Image (cartoon, rainbow, N blue to C red):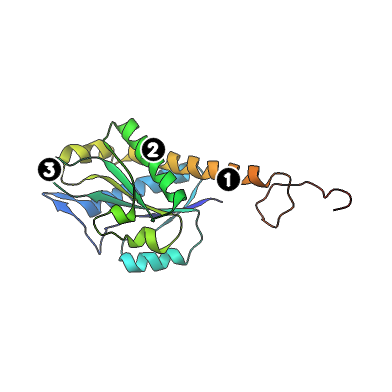
Amino acid sequence: MVTVVVSAGHSIVEEGAVSGDTHESILNMQLRDQLVKQLNALGIATISVSDRLNLRETIKFIHGVTYDAAIEIHFNAGPAAAHGVEAFHKDGDSWGRQLCTQLCSNLSIQLVQHNRGPKSETQSFHKRLGFVHENPRCVLIEAAFVTNREDVACVMRGDDGELWAAIVAKTIADHLSGERLAQLSKHSGCLCSDPGCGGKREPEVGQ
């Protein structure tokens, strides 16, 4: 079964950004719970990272489980006018860049939100993001700016982020499904040792 790891980023032990009475950690956990629900509804198994793990412990935890994709949810912070969604991937990771591109595009279109686009971790404020850097097939999404109430409202929409989560879940599912179909097409008719290969071609006489 396809499995996705979902992390709330800042949570109980690492609160994250705060703007007035808006706490990034609370928003992250709300979106995480909604995303798990939406992924499960699509038949995708989920592994939810404990809210009591710090970043280093989260990275170690993910290293010890089997998964097809992992996503960490965050909210940005900046000037009051700053707004929009962006997503980060490991530098040089084409798989991650494609998923980040799809996430930003789908969210910006369906939520009518500014698209800040996919970015390599080297373009982030920290220049290196442990979540995407230490393990494969991991992306980090900055859903909106916690310092912009309208941007937060665009994501949460009075439904605790249910629509946001549905868009993200469908995007991840489509990305993994497309990857699976591409793999099957590539191996069609072959006799390789890949256990997931659908090829059934018999060897020709003389081979």
Q: Are marks 1 and 3 in contact (CB under 8 Å)?
A: no
Residue located 50% across and 47% down the image: 44
Q: Label 1 vs label 2: CA separation?
A: 20 Å
Q: Would residue 53 be visible to someone looking at this image?
A: no
Residue 33 versus residue 174 in the image, above or below: below
Amino acid type indicated by mark 1: Arg
Front-most of 141 and 204? 204
First in sequence, mark 1 or 2: give its number: 2
Q: Is residue 31 left or right of residue 46?
A: left
Badge 1, how many Cα within 10 Å: few under 14, some, many 20+? some
Q: Which residue is mark 1?
A: 180
Q: Which mark is residue 167?
A: 2
Q: Which residue shows up at 44% across the image and 53% down it? A: 93
Q: Which mark is residue 134?
A: none
Q: What residue is at 48 percent from the left and 63 percent from the top? A: 65
Name the image quarter holding residue 172.
top left
Q: Secondary structure at mark 3?
A: loop
How far apart are the two marked residues, 3 and 2, measured between alpha carbons?
A: 26 Å
Q: Pointer 3: what residue? A: 80
x%, y% of residue 143? 28, 45
Side of 81 relative to 68 (left or right): left
- 3 or 2: mark nearer the eye: 3
Residue count near mark 2 (Cα–Cα under 10 Å), binned few <14, some 14–19, many ≥20: some
Query: Which of disc 2 and disc 3 is earlier in sequence?
Result: 3
